[in-house]
Image (tube, rainbow, N blue to C red):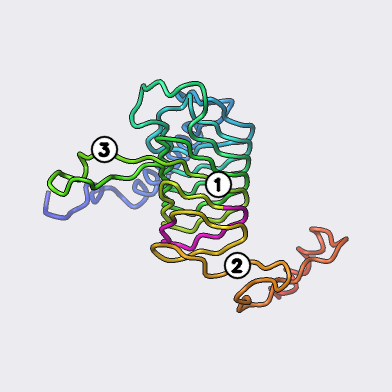
Amino acid sequence: MPKNRSPFAPLTAWRRRALSGAVHRCWRWAREAGAVTAEHPGGLRFARIGEGTRLAFPQGTVFGEPWIRLGDHCVIGEQVTLTAGLMPDLDLGPDPILTLGDGVVLGRGSHVVADTTVTIGADTYCGPYVYITSTNHSYDDPHQPVGKQWPRMEPVSIGPGCWIGTGAVILPGARLGRNVVVAAGAVVRGEVPDRAVVAGAPARVVRGWDEEKGWQPPLRTPAPVPIPEGVTPEQLLAVAQLDEG
């Protein structure tokens, strides 16, 4: 076969379309059959997997499930890593190590590495490729490879209602309050107060909520206008169709 020539080149256009359609149908079937739910856990035995919670297929690395508790109606994207303990098959004691509250969303390719306690509060949404870890490498001995030095562990706590942007990193010991926004790519350590926006590496507070003054510094865009009471979904749809016209 000539260089760079596709193995499907001899196929007719009709056969290539048929083959492509079959591959996509098989993939849709695999994604549905391979998803993990409370009713269909596959080979995973979590301490709890709540009603309506779904781990999309294909899953990432998952181990230590007996010490992982997943709340109700969580959405866990493809290739998400969920681990409890340094390695599989450890006895981690009677208490959960990794806990997700109800309605938590973990975006595609995210990692939650819980070698000690990690708690994510209800209705916290994480974008893709977020990294949350309770373990960090130490660097006490400058003459030894860093990867061979014993890691340090500190619990991580993320309050309810947070939004964690794409590619953010939550480091050991981080304690995020309620309704915190973490900007994309931020690296968070230490304590973050309720209703704060943090950004940067290391992350710092760039906006916060004052009960008397509101957002400080003030928002650059006006707040969205709330939908009036009594408006039905059908009326909203009709308005949207008028706008399109």
* Residue 181 lies within the magenta run: yes
Range covered by the magenta-colored residues: 177-188
State the residue at coordinates (82%, 63%): 235
N-terminal-most mark, 3 or 1: 1
Mark 3 Cα within 10 Å, few/some/many (few <14, many 20+)?
few
Q: In the figure, is residue 213 to the left or right of 25?
A: right
**In the image, is 148 to the left or to the right of 194?**
left
The residue carrying mark 3 is 150
Residue 166 horizontal/vertical position (percent): 45, 58
Q: Which residue type carries mark 3?
A: Trp
Task: Determine the secondary structure under disc 2.
Answer: strand
Give me the C-alpha separation between circle 2 and circle 1. 24 Å
In the rendering, at what x and y percent does residue 64 appear?
A: 42, 27
Q: CA distance from mark 3 to mark 2?
A: 37 Å
For marks 2 and 1, the one nearer the N-term is 1
Residue that mark 1 sits on: 105
